[in-house]
């Protein structure tokens, strides 16, 4: 389909607006001849064939242009869906790694995550969560980055993680 659109656009220079012009001009002339507004005896058969050819070219150009537009929209939608799925997969992998990272935290980071998981709310406005942010254990919840929340995968594992973090936070500096 793309090669036909490319051929029509680049080689012939035909676009949808040209298709409409051919269709309307040729169709109008054929209607004038059909209803006898212009006597067909004055016009030869070759001219009627040219008008018919113009109508056919117009119809084909419109069909190909409509197909190309539909194809481009479908391709764009498919690309957007693929990109969104890839982002969801990437985020799921990060979330899965976040639980593994939380299990091996030590020192201040373990203590800070322990404080967050011990709260009833998973959101915090503590400005000292930079390292947990880089470990993908918390995410900003507003554009300014002043509030963060614990990622869902870590929050769901908090009952299992709290004892581990208590042990690891013992060597807190």
Image: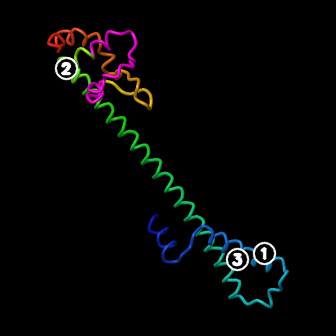
Q: Is mark 1 on a helix, strand or loop?
A: helix
- The residue under the point 71% across, 88% down is 45
- The residue under the point 47% across, 69% down is 6
Magenta-drawn segment: 113-137
Q: Mark 3 points at which residue?
A: 26
Mark 1 and mark 2 lie on one chain; the one further toward the N terminus is: 1
Q: Distance between the residues labelled 1 and 3?
A: 9 Å
Image-based side of 30 in relation to 95, left or right: right
Place residue 105 in its image quadrant.
Answer: top left
Q: What element carries label 3?
A: helix
Tag nearer the camera, 2 or 3: 2
Tag nearer the camera, 1 or 2: 2
Q: Name the residue under label 2.
A: 105
Q: Mark 1 points at which residue?
A: 31
Residue 136 coordinates in the image, percent (x, y): 29, 28
Place residue 165 in its image quadrant.
Answer: top left
Mark 1 and mark 3 lie on one chain; the one further toward the N terminus is: 3
Kindly indicate whether the residue at mark 2 contacts the one at mark 1 (C-beta within 8 angstroms).
Answer: no
Residue 81 coordinates in the image, percent (x, y): 43, 43
How many neighbours does mark 2 have within 10 angstroms: few (below 14), some (14-19), or many (20 or more)? Answer: some
């Amino acid at each position: 389909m793309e090669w036909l659109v490319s051929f029509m656009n680049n080689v012939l220079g035909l676009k949808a607006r040209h298709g409409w012009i051919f269709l309307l001009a040729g169709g109008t002339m054929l209607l004038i001849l059909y209803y006898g507004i212009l006597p067909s005896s004055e016009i030869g058969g070759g001219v009627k064939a040219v008008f018919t050819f113009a109508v056919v070219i117009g119809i084909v150009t419109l069909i190909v242009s409509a197909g190309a537009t539909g194809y481009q929209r479908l391709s764009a939608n498919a690309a957007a869906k693929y990109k969104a799925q890839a982002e969801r997969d990437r985020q799921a992998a990060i979330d899965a790694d976040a639980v593994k990272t939380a299990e091996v935290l030590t020192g201040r980071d373990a203590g800070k995550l322990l404080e967050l998981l011990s709260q009833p709310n998973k959101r915090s406005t503590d400005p000292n969560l930079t390292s947990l942010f880089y470990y993908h254990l918390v995410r900003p919840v507003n554009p300014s980055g002043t509030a963060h929340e614990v990622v869902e995968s870590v929050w769901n594992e908090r009952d299992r993680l709290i004892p581990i973090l208590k042990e690891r936070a013992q060597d807190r500096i």
